[in-house]
Image (tube, rainbow, N blue to C red):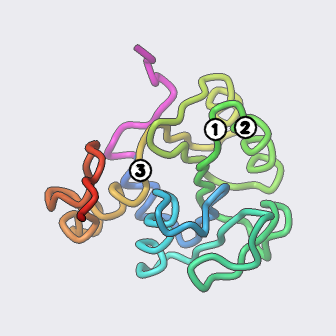
Amino acid sequence: MVSHRLTVARDDCLGIIAGARTVALVGVSADERRASYFVIAYLAHTLLKIYPINPKYSEIAGIKCYPNLASLPLVPDIVVIFRKAEAIPPIVEEAIHIGSKAVWFQLGLHNEQAAARAQSQGLAVIQDRCIKLEHARWAGKLRWAGANTGVISSRRRKRLH
């Protein structure tokens, strides 16, 4: 079992969300079936300014998409990562280089070396948590986010014939 000792506590996590105004979503997909699309669709209806990062697309969910963090018009408060664990270190380096305040490794992702590097440079690190669910918890909209409604499930959906 991974210790996640470099991950902030839930209260600190919510504090990071409460203090954020801008969020970059690295590796977000335009495929409406992907979890990252659900996240961007949810966050687009909040007060946060969202910047999708994916060189494959010109826009996602009606929002202009950027090829990398360096091409953003501003420094995002939080950089959310939807890429595989081995792709995290270079993204963390880019987040450090542009001066972001926090890196967020989406649910199921952790990389202790990248987390340690980010923390050594003063960034807050959140690992293995869903920003959509944590934002909904902070905003009091957890039910709207799909929790406790049967919308989010580990079970495969059965095909209707």
Using a 10 Å C-alpha cutoff, classify the residue at mark 2 as few (fewer than 14 neighbours), some (14 to 19) or many (20 or more).
Answer: few
Q: Quadrant of residue 55?
A: bottom right
Q: Amino acid at mark 2?
A: Ala
Q: Position of residue 87 (x, y in %)?
A: 72, 37
- Left or right: residue 97 versus residue 111 is right
**Label disc, if present, on residue 87 of the rendered structure:** 2
43 in the magenta segment? no
Q: Which residue is mark 3?
A: 130
Between discs 1 and 3, the one toward the N terminus: 1
Q: Which residue is more in the foreground, 142 or 22?
A: 142
Q: Are marks 2 and 1 in contact (CB under 8 Å)?
A: yes
Q: Amino acid at mark 1?
A: Lys
Quarter of the image that includes the C terminus: bottom left
**Label disc, if present, on residue 84 of the rendered structure:** 1
- Left or right: residue 74 versus residue 38 is right
Total labels: the figure holds 3
Per the picture, the main secondary structure of the magenta-coloured stretch is loop
How much space separates mark 2 and mark 1, taking CA atoms? 5 Å
How much space separates mark 3 and mark 2, taking CA atoms? 18 Å
Using a 10 Å C-alpha cutoff, classify the residue at mark 3 as few (fewer than 14 neighbours), some (14 to 19) or many (20 or more).
Answer: many
Q: Quadrant of residue 125?
A: top right
Q: Residue furthest top?
A: 1
Q: Position of residue 113 (x, y in %)?
A: 67, 23
Q: Residue furthest bottom?
A: 62
Task: Indicate whether 33 appears above or below 111.
Answer: below
Q: Residue at x 58, y 54 (%)?
A: 80
- Magenta segment: 1-12
Q: Amino acid at mark 3?
A: Cys
Q: Which residue is more in the foreground, 36 or 51?
A: 36
Q: Position of residue 101 (x, y in %)?
A: 63, 53
Q: Residue at x 37, y 37 (%)?
A: 9
Secondary structure beneath disc 3? loop
